[in-house]
Image (cartoon, grey):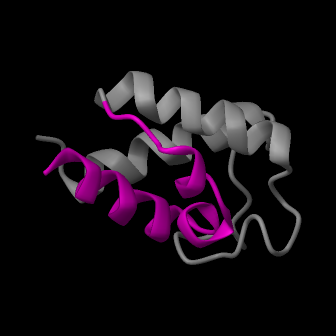
């Protein structure tokens, strides 16, 4: 099973490549709000969900694809880890 650190690294890499052009800015950390601050839009969020499902062999239910589960790297990593159990 993937560790929290591995999940966070995977999410950071995805965000770096798909939002920030290769590097996450220094002012973005694991607890930064990504959806509610509009850093991550709904299209990128759906791509991220698909990426996480593929990377970790999990499946999001439709009702789980929301801001509560996707608003920060920390929140996403915790949610993925619960799906892995």
Above or below: residue 77 compared with residue 44:
below
Name the side, left or right, on which 68 lies relative to 38: left
Tell me the quarter of the image containing the N terminus.
top left
Residue 4 in picture, x, y percent from top left: 26, 58
Residue bounds of the magenta highlight = 58-85
Give the residue displayed 43% in from the left and 30% down from the top. Answer: 53
The front one of 7 and 45 is: 45
Q: Quadrant of residue 19?
A: top right
Pick the residue in front: 64 or 84.
64
Of 56 and 65, the residue lying toward us: 65
Residue 22 appears anywhere in the view = no
Across the whole image, how many numbered discs are drawn on residues? 0
> Main structural element of the magenta stretch: helix, strand or loop?
helix
Identify the residue at image location x=37%, y=26%. 55
Residue shown at the point (57%, 38%) measured from the top left: 49
* Residue 70 on the magenta segment: yes
48 left or right of 51?
A: right
Residue at 85% in and 74% down: 37
Is 57 one of the magenta-colored residues? no
The location of residue 76, given as percent across then percent down, is 47, 59
Q: Is residue 29 left or right of residue 38?
A: left
Task: Place residue 81 in its image quadrant.
Answer: bottom left
At which x and y percent is residue 25? 74, 59
The vertical placement of 29 against 47, above or below, is below
């Amino acid at each position: 099973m993937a560790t929290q650190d591995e999940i966070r690294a995977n999410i950071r890499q995805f965000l770096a490549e798909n939002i920030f052009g290769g590097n996450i800015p220094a002012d973005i950390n694991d607890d930064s709000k990504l959806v509610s601050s509009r850093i991550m839009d709904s299209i990128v969020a759906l791509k991220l969900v698909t990426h996480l499902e593929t990377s970790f062999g999990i499946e999001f239910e439709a009702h789980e694809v929301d801001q509560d589960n996707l608003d920060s790297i920390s929140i996403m990593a915790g949610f993925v880890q619960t799906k892995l159990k």
